[in-house]
Amino acid sequence: MSSLFAFPGQGAQQAGMLHRLPEGSTALLEEASDSLGEQVLALDSQAALQSTRAVQLCLLLAGVAWARWLMQRSPAPDYVAGLSIGAYPAAVAAGALGFADAVRLVALRGELMQRAYPQGYGMTALSGLDLASVERLLAEVGGEVYLANLNSDNQIVIAGSDTAMAEVAAKARSRGQGVARRLAVSVPSHCRLLDGPAAELGEAFANVALRRPRLTYLSGSSARPIFDPQRLRDDLAGNMARLVDWRATLRTAYERGVRLHLEIPPGSVLSGLARPVFEQGRVLAIEGTRPDTLDALLRQEVADKR
């Protein structure tokens, strides 16, 4: 049996999240502040988190801080995976991407996305609809609205203009189909509307050294393991414009023997998505779980493999 660290994406952010990092995170925050030339602790206020750049940086810093804290006291996981921006702390935790490089790239990623769509766009979660039903609604509406995330069998996320997403939601409601919920995301991620920003980020990646992951990195886009640094570079640079297939990523992890799914803070959204897949395993959010419980579970996974 194996273990997985799962890193959340945009929408999981919480005001004050950088002020609640585990003990020993001061050096990480200082390194990030030096890399950016600004104090990163100012990024997690309610007002600051209206910025896509601030949200993505906060999720990167929180993800790396909590993963390092846990790996310093307990065995490392066998697998890492991240939903959208969560792929970046996953790559850092796997030893494939340097932390300072990740900070600079994520700051640029957020800036490019925000600059391309400063207002009038975003993402909406549709619950209780299957993929075929969502695809029919998108075809009826047309315009700037696209599939973005396949999160689970009954949760699909669309991205696009506010107008087109509202029309999809209205059509679903008029037919008594599912529930639509606007997400706390102000850009149309994971669709072709971000092809241009993804290409620009890819140019920035050309000057960054990536290494073969020490932990198995599962792509949230392809739902497959990536070992080659060049493929990982493409996965990270392009994931903002590619469909997220999180349900397939979780199934891949389960099929490869993962039975312990640990969600890195903030939040517990990914745990809810994982439970139907890991019925024969354990799903926990690190936030709110005792450290000795986490340590015991990770050590048991190691013992079970012997």
Image (tube, grey):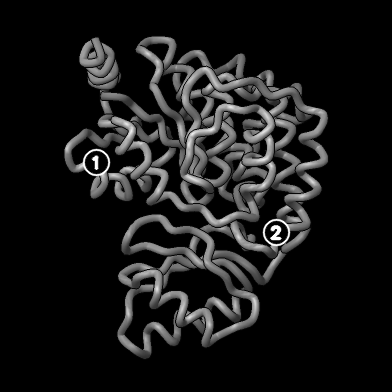
Residue type (three-letter) at the residue carrying disc 1? Phe
Residue drawn where x is 73% and y is 58% of the image: 195
Point out the residue furthest to the left here: 280
> Which residue does the numbered mark 2 point to in the structure image?
194
Tell me: 218 left or right of 153. right
Q: Is residue 161 above or below residue 16?
A: below
The Cα atoms of the two marked residues, 2 and 1, are separated by: 33 Å
Question: Image point 57% across, 43% down: which residue?
Answer: 85
Q: Left of 8 or right of it: where is 300? A: left
* Secondary structure beneath label 1: loop
Picture layout, residue 145 above or below residue 46: below
At x 60% / y 54%, what residue is drawn?
242
Q: Is residue 180 left or right of residue 276?
A: right
Residue occupying image coordinates x 60% and y 48% = 49
Location of the C terminus by quadrant is top left
On screen, residue 109 above or below 265: below
- Residue ID for mark 1: 278
Quarter the N terminus occupies: top left
**What secondary structure is found at the residue carrying circle 2?**
helix
* Res. 60 image quadrant: top right
Say which label, 2 or 1, has the lower sequence index. 2
Please indicate, yes or no, whether residue 130 appears anywhere in the rendered image: yes
Give coordinates of residue 48: x percent, y percent: 64, 47
Q: Residue furthest bottom?
A: 174
